[in-house]
Amino acid sequence: MARYSTTVRSEQPASVAFTFVADLSNLPQWDPGVQRVSQIRGDGLGAESAYEVVLSTSGNTRLLYEMTEFDREALTATLVATHSWFRSIDTISATGNDDGSDVTYDAALELRGPLALLDPLLGLVFNRIGDKAAAGLVGALDGAVVA
């Protein structure tokens, strides 16, 4: 399993920043690895939300991300995508108030089937992908990475 986590500090209110990041419809605005997103279940952001995410890969890989946990008060959400080759678990959380926020995006990726043997190498590639998405998130939230 490979993990990537980043926390971005922003002057945006915590609820606004969380809503923007947790709504996967916004992914193409900050993640260069995403070509497009369509919400296929639910009406806006919520516990029943599901999204089709089309990656910017040569095969235009399609993933179905389902919201498995959502708490608007605690500002936390978990989305899971299962593909024949891998499983992705993404957790988004925010802390702060109306004067600013820290938004954390934590992603865990595990290869499935025979590809699981390549898990030790996955971290290298996953870190590069995560760094590009983190840079986009910093720009979208007009913030800075928290060390």
Image (spheres, rainbow, N blue to C red):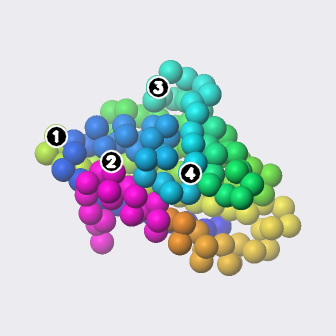
Q: Closer to the camera, 126 or 34?
A: 34
Q: Is residue 136 left or right of residue 33?
A: left
Q: Which of disc 2 and disc 4 is earlier in sequence?
A: 4
20 above or below 144?
A: above
Q: How many neighbours does mark 1 have within 10 angstroms: few (below 14), some (14-19), or many (20 or more)?
A: few
Q: Which of disc 3 and disc 4 is earlier in sequence?
A: 4
Q: Amino acid at mark 4?
A: Val
Q: Which quadrant would the C terminus be assigned to in this image?
A: bottom left
The residue where tag 2 is placed is: 94
**In 3D space, how far apart are the residues under numbered discs 4 and 3 (Cα atoms)?**
19 Å
Q: How many neighbours does mark 2 have within 10 angstroms: few (below 14), some (14-19), or many (20 or more)?
A: many
Q: How many neighbours does mark 3 have within 10 angstroms: few (below 14), some (14-19), or many (20 or more)?
A: few
Q: Which mark is drawn over residue 34?
A: 4
**In 3D space, how far apart are the residues under numbered discs 1 and 4 (Cα atoms)?**
30 Å
Q: Is residue 46 left or right of residue 57?
A: left
- Residue at 41% from the left image edge and 34% from the top image edge: 71
Residue range corresponding to the magenta coloring: 131-147
- Residue at 80% from the left image edge and 67% from the top image edge: 115
**In 3D space, how far apart are the residues under numbered discs 3 and 1 (Cα atoms)?**
22 Å
Does the residue at mark 3 contact the one at mark 1 (Cβ under 8 Å)? no
Secondary structure category for the residue under label 1 = loop
Secondary structure category for the residue under label 4 = strand
Secondary structure category for the residue under label 3 = loop
